Amino acid sequence: MTDSEQKVIDGRVWEEFCDALKDAGKIIQSEKAPKDAFNQAEGYRYLTRLLRGGLESFLEHRDSAFPQLRCGCHETIKLGADNPDNRYESAPIDPRYDYRITGSRGTVDYLGFGTVINKYASGGTMETTGYLDARQMDIGEDGIVELIISQKEQPGNWLPMGPETNSINVRQTFQDRINEEPAELKIERIGVEQDRPDPLTADKLERSLQGAIAFVKGSAQLFENWSESFLPINNQLPPADQAFCQAIGGDPNIFYFHSAWSLEDDEVLVIEAPEIPECQTWNFQLDNWWMESLDYRHHTIHVNKHTAHYESDGSVRVVISHANPGVPNWIETAGHSMGTMCWRWIGAQEHPELKTRVMKLSELKEICL
């Protein structure tokens, strides 16, 4: 009998899992994290969301010999300033194998594929080892997509892997979710002889539970630390450290701005983009302290190139406030008084900086006349 089998039989595998999950709660109590009941409640909900994502990833969809593209970040599982305009999909892959992605392109504005070394569960990084977006691909007149993923270069649409690649990420970025059609894709390992995965074993269960907990801790700590780093630039929105953004899984085609925000009941934060560069798209979003996008199902917490109102000179003014100020591009705080925020230039060659200022709600009308 193996050690894992004995731990399953006597219940230790579950006890160790529960103890480790309890320990993850200490991250929510980090020194600089907000201590009020509202933000703490969101923090503990955040851990439950990460746990759901971790169990899906490490227990239910871990087999790189039989990968499935799944949406692991969405309306109720959020992390790392998740983009409300995106559909995120991922699957485990192994550089020893070759894979094929097939499906329909749809009409979604942006479609990108990236192979990565995902270490969110063991160090908090996600290095990109290969990247390809739809503009670089040959797509059939009928909209059919076919893409080969391998270490060895292949003819046609080829996405490289490195010797340590362990996952593929697919990003779909919408300008208009209601009217755009998403890409419908599937992944398969090429040259499969075995037609179905092996059954669960005690060893697989133990490693999967350990991986899920490591993902919860690693992800929560990574973004808690990042939120704390924004405090010195609160209510400003300068360019982020682009190398760091890429090291934790950022899209190579995106230039990021990240920071923290906080507002009193009678205050507004005005963000101005005097110049909009030529780009595939751009967007802004409001997040909570834990770097989860706010609830975009029920609140207007983001704006993009398609939905924004532009000034007569082509500039954009975004207004963040608790109550509706009666001006275009209002971003709701959705019951929050502080949090984090993100602006993206996507597919731009130039990255103009942004202007921010905090003012009283009563003063806003003067600049919006």
Image: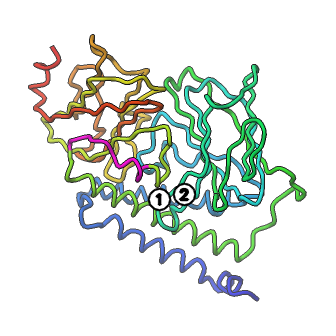
**Which quadrant is home to the N terminus?**
bottom right
> On screen, 369 above or below 69?
above
- Front residue of this view, candidates 337 and 238: 238
* x, y percent for residue 299: 37, 33
Dividing the picture into quadrants, the one containing residue 296 is top left
Q: Which residue is at a point 40% across and 53% down the rendered structure image?
A: 244
10 Å crowding of disc 2: few (<14), some (14-19), many (20+): some
Task: Identify the main secondary structure in magenta.
Answer: loop
Q: Residue at x 14, y 20 (%)?
A: 367
Residue 327 x, y percent position in the rendering: 24, 20
Reply above or below: 189 against 268: below
**Residue designated by label 2:** 52
Label 1: state its secondary structure: helix
Q: Secondary structure at mark 2?
A: helix
What is the distance, in whole Å, between disc 1 and disc 2 at their CAs? 6 Å
For the residue marked with disc 1, what is the amino acid?
Thr
- Nearest the camera: 242 or 22? 242
Q: Is residue 90 left or right of residue 97?
A: left
Quadrant for the C terminus, please: top left
Left or right: 36, with 12 as reference point: left
- The segment highlighted magenta reads 235-245
Q: Position of residue 276 (x, y in %)?
A: 35, 23
- What's the residue type where badge 2 is placed? Arg
Question: x%, y% of residue 297?
Answer: 44, 35
Q: Are marks 1 and 2 in contact (CB under 8 Å)?
A: yes
Q: Which mark is residue 13?
A: none
Tag shown at residue 48: 1
Q: Residue at x 20, y 47 (%)?
A: 234
**Residue 241 is inside the magenta segment:** yes
